Image (spheres, helix red, strand yellow):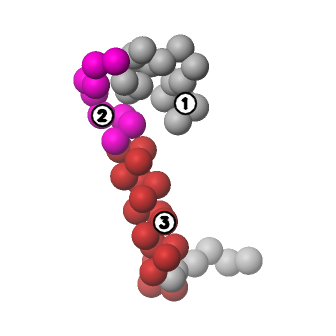
C-alpha cells in the first residue's frame, strides 16, 4: 500500500490527525500543577506522559 498524500486523506482522517497532534501538544505543556506533563506525573501515581 502506498503512502497517501495529505490531499488524498478524507476529512475525517485529517481531523483525526489534527486531534492527535493537539492532544500530544496539550500533554506536553508545562507547568501544570498536580497534572501530568513533561516535568512529571503530578498527583497521578498511575499515569505518566509516556502512557498518555
Q: Secondary structure at mark 3?
A: helix
Q: Residue 52 magenta-drawn?
A: no
Determine the CA span between mark 2 and mark 3. Answer: 20 Å
Circle 1 residue: 50
When asked about the image quadrant of residue 42, the answer is top left
Q: How many marks?
A: 3
Q: Is 43 on the left or on the right of 4, as rendered? A: left
Q: Percent x, y for residue 25?
A: 35, 44
Circle 2 residue: 29
Q: Secondary structure at mark 1?
A: loop
Residues drawn in magenta:
26-34
Q: Percent x, y for residue 26?
A: 34, 41
Of the two numbered discs 1 and 2 on the same chain, state the one appearing first in sequence: 2
Per the rendering, the mark at residue 16 is: 3
Of the two numbered discs 3 and 1 on the same chain, state the one appearing first in sequence: 3
Instruction: Give above or below for 42 relative to 14.
Output: above
Determine the CA span between mark 1 and mark 2. Answer: 14 Å
Amino acid at each position: 500500500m502506498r503512502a497517501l498524500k495529505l490531499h488524498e486523506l478524507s476529512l475525517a482522517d485529517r481531523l483525526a490527525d489534527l486531534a492527535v497532534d493537539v492532544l500530544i501538544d496539550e500533554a506536553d505543556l508545562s507547568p501544570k500543577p498536580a497534572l501530568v506533563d513533561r516535568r512529571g506525573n503530578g498527583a497521578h501515581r498511575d499515569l505518566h506522559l509516556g502512557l498518555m
